[in-house]
Amino acid sequence: MPGLGWFDAKVKRFEVTRLSKKTLLPHMGWNDVIPVADSPLLAGLDAPRFYFLHSYFFAPGDPSQSLATTNYSFDFTSAVGQKNIYGVQFHPEKSHGWGIQLLHNFARM
């Protein structure tokens, strides 16, 4: 399915063979989110950890769209942005103070 076409990207399922024996699907739980680009979406987030629950990841065709990465046996993009469109792979509504700050940042943009 092509999606909305807002990003040059693919959504891929985690390959079980690529995951370490300690990781399972779905990817569920708390993980570090490492900013890789300056973005107002991630402002004020010091060493953020967010809650994840998924079996797929977003693979942007243009690396400049990646705002943050997370490691789950390998690094994958966990936050993207392009112009005024943003997306995250995690659940900010379940992520305590970090999620509140991210939602606050989003509302201010």
Image (tube, helix red, strand yellow):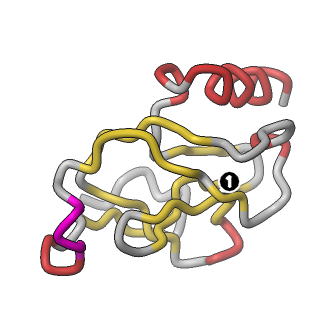
Write the residue at 76% across / 21% down: 104
The residue indicated by pointer 1 is 81
Which picture quadrant has residue 19?
bottom left
Q: Quadrant of the N terminus?
A: bottom left
Which residues fall within the magenta stretch?
Answer: 19-23
Where residue 107 appears, as percent x and y from the top left, is 76, 21
Q: Residue at x 65, y 58 (%)?
A: 34
Question: What's the residue at 85%, 36% (across, down)?
Answer: 44
Give the amino acid at mark 1: Gly
Q: Residue at x 20, y 48 (%)?
A: 26
Instruction: Give above or below for 77 relative to 41.
Output: below
Helix, strand or loop for disc 1: strand
Quarter the C terminus occupies: top right
Dividing the picture into quadrants, the one containing residue 92 is top right
Judged left or right of residue 75, residue 24 is left
State left or right for residue 26 relative to residue 103.
left
Most foreground residue, 79 or 8: 79
Q: Main secondary structure of the magenta part?
A: loop
101 sits to left or right of 12: right
Identify which residue, 108 or 85, lies in the foreground. 108
Find residue 32 and report its horizontal and vertical position in percent.
Answer: 56, 51
**Image height of 34 relative to 21, above or below:** above
Q: Is residue 29 magenta?
A: no
- For disc 1, the neighbor class at 10 Å (few under 14, some 14 to 19, many from 20) is some
Between residues 7 and 24, which one lies in front from this camera angle? 24
